[in-house]
């Protein structure tokens, strides 16, 4: 376990009474440098924070105690629960993101993340399906940690699910604007996994955003917002792993 650098942020409050920590939300900072991100997460005026920030060189900064409510998720919904700040731990990974030159997450950073997750899981016993990205819980407005994030590696360590089937076929079978039995099936599966779908009958903007988030997490080689045969296969697999 890397040394934890205490760097308290003023941006937190108490979790609601009875709230149980059952989710870890992973973010990228999406800012030019880690120092700029750290300063913003500790700026009282900004009113944003996370429990931890991990630099690209593997340094881990503890900003908010785990038992407190950090302000990282914003407007969010996952598996029928609103406002993930109440029940989650937020981890920011220093990465410039899509606006400043998105790049792969370095080995030192990922190694520190895995060690940090081991400790969190020991303390809170997070279910395998409780490890999600910011884009999963807010797919209409967020795209982090993005398609370069090593979800498969995390899953190998028990932090998240990973498909047991391939998904190479990019033949499109459902896209925005359609209404049919396949769309209903896909929307139901997205809902089983955790995405909030407004209208299961239609492939609308909500479905498109959810599909992009799903692909970035579980089918990162093709993030298109349409459902092709490969995406459909993986979607069915992940939904099936959740016992549905």
Image (cartoon, grey):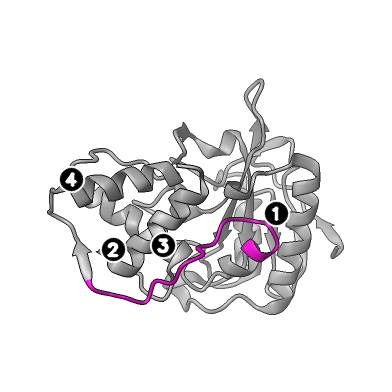
Q: Nearer the viewer, mark 4 or mark 3?
A: 3
Q: Could you tell which of marks 1 and 3 lies nearer the N-terminus?
A: 1
Task: Tell me the distance, in whole angstroms, between the alpha carbons under discs 2 and 4.
Answer: 14 Å
Q: Nearer the viewer, mark 4 or mark 1?
A: 4
Q: Could you tell which of marks 4 and 1 lies nearer the N-terminus?
A: 1
Q: Could you tell which of marks 2 and 3 lies nearer the N-terminus?
A: 2
Q: Which residue is mark 4?
A: 202
Q: Position of residue 28 (x, y in %)?
A: 55, 63
Is 163 situated left or right of 156 in this image? left
What secondary structure is found at the residue carrying circle 1? strand
Give the class, few, some or many, for how many residues have Cα within 10 Å of label 2's Cα (few <14, many ≥20).
many
Q: Which residue is mark 2?
A: 225
Q: Residue at x 51, y 63 (%)?
A: 145
Q: Which residue is mark 3?
A: 234
What secondary structure is found at the residue carrying circle 4? loop
Check whether the beta carbons of the residues at disc 2 and disc 4 lie within 8 A of each other: no
The residue segment tinted magenta is: 155-171
Q: Residue at x 37, y 42 (%)?
A: 191
Q: Which residue is mark 1?
A: 52
Quadrant position of residue 124: top right
Is 100 situated left or right of 175 in this image? right
């Amino acid at each position: 376990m890397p040394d934890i650098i205490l760097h308290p942020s003023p941006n937190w409050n108490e979790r609601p009474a009875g709230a149980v920590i059952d989710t870890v939300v992973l973010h990228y900072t999406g800012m030019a440098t880690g120092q700029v991100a750290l300063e913003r997460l500790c700026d009282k005026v900004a009113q944003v924070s996370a429990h931890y920030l991990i630099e690209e060189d593997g340094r881990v900064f503890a900003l908010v105690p785990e038992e407190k409510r950090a302000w990282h998720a914003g407007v969010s919904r996952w598996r029928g629960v609103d406002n993930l700040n109440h029940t989650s731990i937020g981890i920011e990974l220093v990465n410039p993101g899509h606006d400043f030159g998105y790049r792969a997450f370095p080995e030192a950073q990922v190694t520190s993340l895995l060690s940090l997750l081991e400790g969190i899981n020991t303390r809170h016993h997070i279910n395998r399906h409780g490890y999600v990205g910011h884009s999963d819980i807010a797919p209409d407005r967020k795209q982090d940690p993005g398609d370069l994030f090593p979800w498969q590696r995390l899953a190998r360590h028990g932090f998240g699910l990973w498909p047991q089937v391939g998904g190479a076929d990019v033949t499109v079978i459902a896209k925005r604007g359609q209404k049919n039995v396949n769309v209903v099936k896909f929307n139901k599966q997205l809902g089983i996994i955790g995405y909030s779908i407004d209208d299961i009958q239609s492939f609308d903007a909500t479905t498109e955003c959810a599909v992009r988030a799903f692909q970035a997490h579980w089918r990162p080689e093709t993030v298109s917002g349409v459902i092709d045969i490969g995406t459909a296969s993986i979607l069915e697999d992940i939904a099936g792993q959740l016992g549905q």
